[in-house]
Amino acid sequence: MEIIAQEKELDEVVKVLIDKLPENRIFTFVGDLGAGKTTLIKKFCSKLGVTSEMSSPTFGLVNTYNSNNGTIYHTDWYRVNDIVELYDVGIDESLEDGIWLIEWPEIGMNLINFYYPIIIEISHNDRNRKYTLNID
């Protein structure tokens, strides 16, 4: 599924993602720096009732939020050097709990593929962002 939208039209993208809950609990966000991964995640979390301040977890690795649908884990693997680091912090033991929103997932795909994550690829130009969702 492909959706082309401006930032103000993110509600359409978020609705599609929310419709996949609770069956799908792992969502990955792929795109260049500045593509809009964190912006989409903030909108998604807001629609799920998160009221706390949200930011990219680049340096803290995982931010945790309370939502109407349970705990949301927002993680960013941009600075992770290899999959061993993810095992060292116990990511593999936590994936069955809550909703996982993973930016820069490439390094850990072997870890999360077992859970059949929804992959959201984001590309952009000056006016629009294109969201490609791997939803069956």
Image (spheres, rainbow, N blue to C red):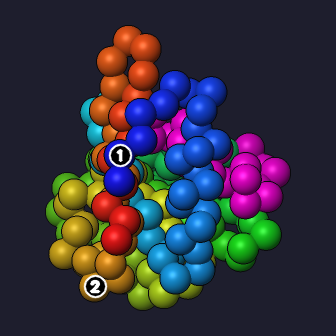
Q: Secondary structure at mark 1?
A: strand
Q: Secondary structure at mark 2?
A: helix
The correct choice, above or below, for 1 with respect to 31 in the image is below
**Of residues 124 and 106, the one drawn nearer to the viewer in this rendering:** 124
* Residue 28, position as x, y percentages in the image: 38, 59
Q: Amino acid at mark 2?
A: Phe
Which of marks 1 and 2 precedes in the sequence?
1
Q: As drawn, is 55 to the left or to the right of 113?
A: right
The correct choice, above or below, for 102 with respect to 8 in the image is below
Which residue occupies 61% across, 63% down? 18
Q: As drawn, is 48 to the left or to the right of 57?
A: right
> Residue at the top extreme?
126
The span picked out in magenta is 34-53
**Of residues 61 and 41, the one drawn nearer to the viewer in this rendering:** 41
Which residue occupies 34% across, 71% down? 136
Q: Amino acid at mark 1?
A: Glu
Q: Quadrant of residue 88?
A: bottom left
Q: Quadrant of residue 65?
A: bottom right
Q: Is residue 38 something one can see in this rendering?
A: yes
Q: Is residue 52 magenta?
A: yes
Q: Which residue is tagged 1? A: 2
Label 2 with label 1: CB-CB less than 8 Å = no
Q: Quadrant of residue 135?
A: bottom left
Per the rendering, the mark at residue 124 is: none
* Residue 2, position as x, y percentages in the image: 35, 46
The correct choice, above or below, for 28 with respect to 54 in the image is below
* Residue 102, position as x, y percentages in the image: 42, 59
Please state which of the two labelled residues, at mark 2 or mark 1, is closer to the viewer.
1
* Residue 78, position as x, y percentages in the image: 30, 47
Q: As drawn, is 93 to the left or to the right of 8?
A: left
Q: Which residue is tagged 2? A: 114
Label 1 packing within 10 angstroms: few (<14), some (14-19), many (20+): some
